[in-house]
Amino acid sequence: MGDVFTMKMHNDEMGDYEMRNYVVEYDLNKRIAWEPELSAVSRTEFVVHIGNRAGYRWGYELESDGPHATVVTEIFDCTQAPEWLRVAIDDGNRWLPGMTATLERLDELCRQKP
């Protein structure tokens, strides 16, 4: 709790940007969640949003599924975000394809033998 990590990101709408993420929930081997804040942008029209946490959270829940397996659930919670943002992202449904791809990639990486 309280740690901060930064991710460099890109999408077609925003171009290159950076998110500073504040860890707001942490339960060892069970859950981690963070609140992102835009910290850098490549497109000037998004500069006004730098420093805004926007009221949403990302996270992962982990559940043991035997001695060598874990079920990972990715979470996006925008219930505290402003209405304009919830509408723009369809209450988080906009992120479902990306979340699915992330979990599939995680599964692929975890299945690789060293």
Image: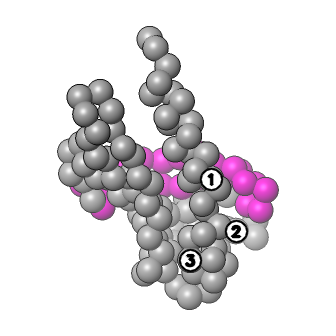
Amino acid type shown at disc 1? Gly
Task: Kindly identify which residue carries mark 1.
Answer: 98
Amino acid type shown at disc 2? Phe
Q: Nearer the viewer, mark 3 or mark 2?
A: 3
Amino acid type shown at disc 3? Asp
Q: Is residue 3 magenta?
A: yes
Task: Kindly identify which residue carries mark 3.
Answer: 91
Q: Earlier in the sequence, mark 3 or mark 1?
A: 3
Task: Kindly identify which residue carries mark 2.
Answer: 46
The answer to whether one can see residue 72 in this image is yes
Where is residue 26 drawn, in percent x and y? Answer: 25, 53
Q: Earlier in the sequence, mark 2 or mark 1?
A: 2
Does residue 109 appear to the left or right of 8 in the view shown? left
The answer to whether one can see residue 85 in this image is no
Quadrant holding the C terminus: top left
Indicate the colouring scheme.
one colour
